[in-house]
Image: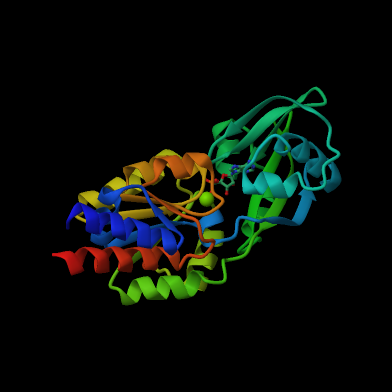
């Protein structure tokens, strides 16, 4: 393709709400044969709300929510935004985001951790049987645990919804002959529920941010040309290792910076639109 034609392609893509960072990204877009979709905030809206909460070990669910809310007030993760909604929480000191796992900080003189069961295990916090079965009972909702002073004191379940256009966008990708994969740090039950809803048959769940990149490398090593579509800080490594990184609208700056393409429409049809446009633009010129 001539430089002029590539520039025209980049400009046309912009008209579709697809910001392509230069001609080379347009060529990469055309070559894609596998689309890896992040779940939370990409396939789903990322606007979560709390749907259930429970107290463990003598704590009430209200206390668990209060301690968790204090820590999550300092985090921008979609789960944190849901838990900290409403405000009015005690102050947090020494806040730390544990990307892809949870968050921690000191609240009212005690160390509070909010996050996945895997994180608790990693930190040496025993997950009581009760908490394990509560998590297993949640189905499509995402459950996180709250620990205080080294013991689990509660659980909080959050949920968001699948973007209305996700299923038809995936159907279009399949019709175009592309393979799709759902990749998430969330648990298997929540991941499978979303995959089924949007028609994606390949699911990788409970994948930590660094391992998301490893999944991409594995696909590339098998000869796939991989696009990753993601929104979060946790997707940065995967977006950077993909043949084509695509950051969704309203995602984090980290995702946008690690990507070759930024989708400014809040609609997953921007993905097949971009791939079709790249193919059309580049083939008319040859
Ligand atoms: P996804 O891949 O679906 O975008 P993340 O990698 O951001 O998800 O998070 C993976 C898991 O880590 C979440 O499902 C949750 O269990 C936990 N987690 C991450 N950040 C937080 C947080 N701020 N508060 C509670 N849990 C969190
Ligand atoms: Mg995400």
Numbered disc total: 0
Q: Which of the pair 122/72 is nearer the observer? A: 72
| Image position, residue 251 (x, y; %) | 54, 48
Is 167 situated above or below 256? below
Q: Is residue 239 visible?
A: yes
Q: Residue at x 38, y 67 (%)?
A: 273
Q: Which of the pair 47/263 is nearer the observer? A: 263
Is 92 situated above or below 82? above
Q: Which of the pair 95/176 is nearer the observer? A: 176
Please identify the residue farthest to the front as the structure is shown: 4
| Image position, residue 11 (x, y; %) | 36, 58
Q: Residue at x 50, y 69 (%)?
A: 166
Q: Residue at x 66, y 59 (%)?
A: 159
The N terminus - image quarter: bottom left
Please identify the residue farthest to the left as the structure is shown: 286
Is 28 situated above or below 274? above
Q: Is residue 199 visible?
A: no
Q: Residue at x 71, y 38 (%)?
A: 72
* Side (left or right) of 104 relative to 68: left
Q: Quadrant of residue 270?
A: bottom left
Q: Quadrant of residue 285?
A: bottom left
| Image position, residue 236 (x, y; %) | 43, 41
The C terminus - image quarter: bottom left
> Coloring scheme of the render?
rainbow
Q: Which of the pair 173/99 is nearer the observer? A: 173
């Amino acid at each position: 393709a001539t430089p002029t034609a590539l520039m025209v392609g980049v400009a046309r893509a912009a008209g579709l709400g697809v910001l392509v960072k230069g001609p080379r990204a347009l060529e990469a877009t055309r070559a894609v044969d596998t689309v890896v979709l992040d779940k939370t905030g990409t396939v789903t809206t990322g606007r979560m709300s709390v749907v259930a909460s429970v107290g463990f070990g003598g704590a009430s669910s209200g206390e668990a929510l209060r301690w968790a809310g204090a820590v999550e007030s300092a985090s921008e993760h979609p789960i944190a935004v849901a838990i900290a909604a409403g405000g009015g929480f005690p102050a947090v000191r020494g806040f730390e985001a544990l990307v892809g796992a949870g968050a921690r900080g000191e609240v009212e003189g005690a160390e509070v951790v909010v996050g996945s069961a895997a994180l608790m295990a990693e930190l040496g916090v025993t997950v009581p049987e009760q908490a394990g079965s509560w998590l297993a009972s949640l189905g499509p909702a995402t459950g996180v645990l709250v620990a205080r002073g080294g013991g689990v004191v509660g659980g909080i379940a959050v949920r968001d919804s699948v973007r209305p256009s996700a299923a038809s966008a995936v159907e279009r990708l399949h019709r175009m002959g592309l393979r799709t994969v759902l990749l998430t740090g969330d648990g298997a039950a929540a991941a499978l529920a979303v995959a089924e809803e949007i028609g994606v048959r390949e699911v990788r769940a409970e994948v930590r941010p660094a391992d998301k990149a490893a999944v991409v490398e594995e696909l590339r090593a098998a000869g796939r040309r991989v696009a990753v579509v993601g929104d979060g800080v946790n997707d940065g490594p995967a977006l950077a290792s993909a043949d084509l990184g695509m950051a969704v609208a309203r995602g984090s700056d980290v995702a946008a910076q690690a990507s070759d393409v930024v989708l400014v429409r809040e609609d997953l049809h921007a993905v097949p639109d971009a791939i079709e446009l790249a193919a059309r633009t580049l083939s008319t010129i040859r």
